[in-house]
Image (tube, helix red, strand yellow):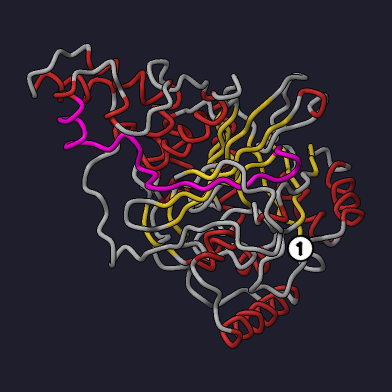
Amino acid sequence: MTAEDPAAKPANVPLFGLRPAPSAVRPRDPRPGISGLAPGELEAWMTANGHPAFRARQVLDAAWRGKQTTFAEIHTLPPAIREALDAAFRLDTMAETEILATDGGLTEKALHRLSDGLLIESVLMHYPARDLAGARDAAGARGANRERHTLCISSQAGCAVGCPFCATGELGMERDLETAEILDQVRNAQRRLTADGKRLTNIVFMGMGEPLLNLDRVLASIEALNDPVRFGLGARHITVSTSGVVPGIRRLTALGPQFTLAVSLHAARNPLRDVLVPLNRRWPVEEVVAAAREHAATTGRRVTYEMTMIDGINDTDGDADALAVLLRGDLAHVNLIPMNQVAHTPWTGTPIAVVERFAERVRAAGIAVTIRFNRGTEIGAACGQLAAEHAGQPTPIVVQRRRERIVAQSAAALRGERSDEPAPAGTGEGSG
């Protein structure tokens, strides 16, 4: 079920009918998703089951270039093969998807229900050619004056990192996504674009979850996205974000990829980053930036640093100066993004005039900076906002206690005190 245009509904009315069902209540469908299979694997399955190997290409063509969502719709295949495929695989791992559009249709938020009832999100952002002259995309990459369509996808259901300004952190960690569940977000968006004769131009792993904590599947997804037999998107049009999983960054560096690495920095001083990015308690900011610096030197690809700007917290002249010292001389680009309001935090986004002053101070140190303006704020387009809403609102006392804890932690951080809390559980490795 896909609701393609619910944008006409009033903003204060629930727009999504989907509700999460805990995985303990609804077992996950054991059939692997077809998009997670390499061409050779599908050919081997065909041969082992007595079917011609060339049928694998027909299946892949339907999966990656067609509009079909079930094997029964692939009429180029004999009925017997369709039935056998349906018994062994899923053509689409998204059990249900609902779409909400905003910004005059330029932003589309998708809420996907997985087979076990968990909800994940992806966001499709359209950039008309006239908006791109001299501009940079979500990853900070400069593009020609041409139309672009960027998809932000999730790599986990929930997130273990627990950044207090992020709605996904409110959900906690459910599970890693399968390779096919990552890729089917892309296929879903591409089917919508194909209807208008368009194609995805950029993909960013900046949705729900920490990509480098599900790295094996993220890398398998990128391989499929690069593969001309499957999606055929160049590596330089893909960005992988991390909140600072140093072993994962080092593993990427050893592979020498050509996609863009983005680091969710949010603060250049350890006491404050301990609060804003709890993973910092395991890998301090200097270690994170050192790993990213090595990545840039090895790959020749500039690293993007993301800063969510929070009023009165990380937007001072001192924060700008600390950022300039941390990144001076690096092959780096900084994106500044005013924070989206999240219900359980006491914080608000930095006013644009303050963001601009911060940007100029960092630029004066010779570091490239772009200010990014939020898309889709009225539909909760920041990652995790809709899934958190549909998971059910926490009780007022829980929200109050969260706010009090955040206020106390940030006040201590602004005094220069390091957190004595451990790093979040489930964030100890970067191997995926």
Badge 1 crowding class, 10 Å Cα cut-off, few under 14, some 14 to 19, many 20 or more, is: many
Q: Splitting the image into 4 quarters, where does residue 226 fall?
A: top left
Q: Is residue 41 left or right of residue 291?
A: left
Residue sitting at x 81%, y 65%: 311
Asked if one can make out residue 359 in the rendered structure from this viewpoint, the answer is yes
Image spot of residue 151 (x, y percent):
58, 36
Give the residue furthest to the bottom.
Answer: 397
Looking at the image, which residue is at 73% across and 58% down? 339
**Quarter in which the N terminus is drawn:** top left
Amino acid type of the residue that numbered disc 1 sits on in the rendered structure: Ile
- Picture residue at 56% right of the left edge, 45% below the top: 99
- SS type, badge 1: loop
The x and y percentages for residue 54 are 22, 11
The magenta-colored residue range is: 82-106
Taking depth in this image into account, of 175 and 366 the one nearest to the observer is: 175
Q: Which residue is mark 1?
A: 310
Q: Is residue 97 magenta?
A: yes
Q: At 52% from the left edge and 24% from the top edge, which residue is drawn? A: 235
Q: Position of residue 102 (x, y in %)?
A: 71, 46
- In front of the other: 51 or 145: 51
Q: Is residue 300 visible?
A: no
Query: Measured along the vertical axis of the image, is residue 207 above or below residue 22?
Result: above
| Residue 382: image location, x then y, percent | 64, 53
Q: Is residue 229 above or below residue 157?
A: above
Describe residue 311's horizontal placement relative to residue 17 as left or right. Answer: right
379, above or below 294, in the image: below
